[in-house]
Image: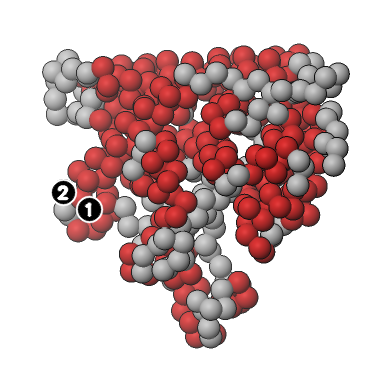
Amino acid sequence: MGDLLTGMVACGLLGLIGQGTRAVIGLSKANVFGGNGATQQSSFNAAYLVISLIVGFIAGVLAGLALGVIQPSVPSGSVIPDRQTLLGLIAAGYAGTDFIEATFAKLMPQPGTPDATASKTPVANAAANNNPNDGANAVQALTGTVQALTSHVVAMSQVQPATLQKPPGSPAVDLASALRSVLPAVNVAVWVPALDGAFAMYGLNTPLRVAAALGQFVAEAGADFRELRENMNYTASQLLQYFPHEVPDQATADRYAGMGGEAIGNLVYANKQGNGSEASGDGYRFRGGGLIQLTGRVDYEPFAKAVGMDLDQAADYVATAEGAAVSACWYLSVRGCLPLADQWRLTDLTEAVNGGARLGLATRIDYANRFRHAFGVPVPPG
């Protein structure tokens, strides 16, 4: 028992180091961006740091279990982590709540909820079938996620913070204060670092580009940036309304509405956007994800290649704050949206993101203009 606790403490401390680093960077960036808002934030910095350290400790323990560093039946000290494993534990702590959520989504699906009932994780199947190989596969998948996070945290750490190019005479761009003003439900301590790194990585380096992007993000992921995976839990009437070709009659709608989100996703996204058949499971796995809602293999495959992950890792990554921001900025960059933002052609930009339907166009334009006003920059001439 003492050996087990020693291993847990050691892994937890490495996770604590990772999350402590992130918390310090986050608070520093929030203060730098925050300008006058830094004084308002200082009152809760200490509490935020303590909570972050606890989260990092827990993430480190979970990663230690996934990577085999913590083994109840093996004496402490007989498992010597290599450099990559140590970095993985720190990276898991750095990812913090995102890693913890991903871990529990893989290992402990909630019974009774549509997504969890439909999800067929290897560990869930192992429990039902008493097959130890399936449990090993789940740990292997989680290990791959830790390793992918390790590589990407290292890459993100090498990205310099975004420096927005401001028109002469315009006030300093204040991302943290703008988020607090326009989107008060957004967690600034989480999203400023995530957005800042993604903006720098993909050339969103002007107030107009950032404002236009944020307008798109609100329409796709909500005003609190919490809708990072598409909710496929539709009623029968909604299925008939939104998917008339895939759900042609009431009987089909009733059947699939009772089967839950995974079945619906696999039906309505089958054989489109690069996905396989309904039986392939691609539709649900590659449903909308991230701040711009990447959808289908046609989006996930090039994104996974761009960030050096496999498809499953990329699908998990877009549900984290960092991955949601990185995937969204990558998408805007590769789809040619940045020049449209420079010219403030928001209708054309929305069409590039959402297609001819241009769903939520008014919302996208409204919030883009709110952020533009918050940044204090005019509409470009012409």
**Residue at image mark 1:** 126
The local crowd at label 1, few if under 14, some if 14 to 19, many if 20 or more residues have their Cα within 10 Å, is: some
**Image location of residue 361, percent across then percent down:** 74, 55
Is residue 322 visible from the viewing direction of this image?
yes
Q: In front: 99, or 206?
A: 206
Q: Is residue 218 left or right of residue 239?
A: right
**Which element carries disc 2, helix, strand or loop?**
helix
Front label number (1 vs 2): 2
Question: Which residue is at 72% across, 57% downward?
Answer: 360
**Residue at image mark 2:** 133
> Looking at the rendering, in which quadrant would you find the C terminus?
top right
Q: Reply above or below: 1 against 204.
A: above
Q: Is residue 213 left or right of residue 246?
A: right
Q: Is the image coloured rainbow, by chain, by secondary structure, or in one colour? A: secondary structure
Question: Which residue is at 50% across, 76% downward?
Answer: 246
Would you identify the image quadrant in which residue 175 lies? top right
Q: In front: 16, or 252?
A: 252
Specify the amino acid type for callout 1.
Ala
**Image location of residue 365, percent across then percent down:** 78, 48
What is the tally of numbered marks visible in this picture? 2
Chain-order first, disc 1 or disc 2: 1
Q: Reply above or below: 250 against 111.
A: below
Question: Which residue is at 22% across, 19% downward?
Answer: 81
> Looking at the rendering, in which quadrant would you find the N terminus?
top left
**Image location of residue 352, percent across then percent down:** 63, 53
Specify the amino acid type for callout 2.
Asn
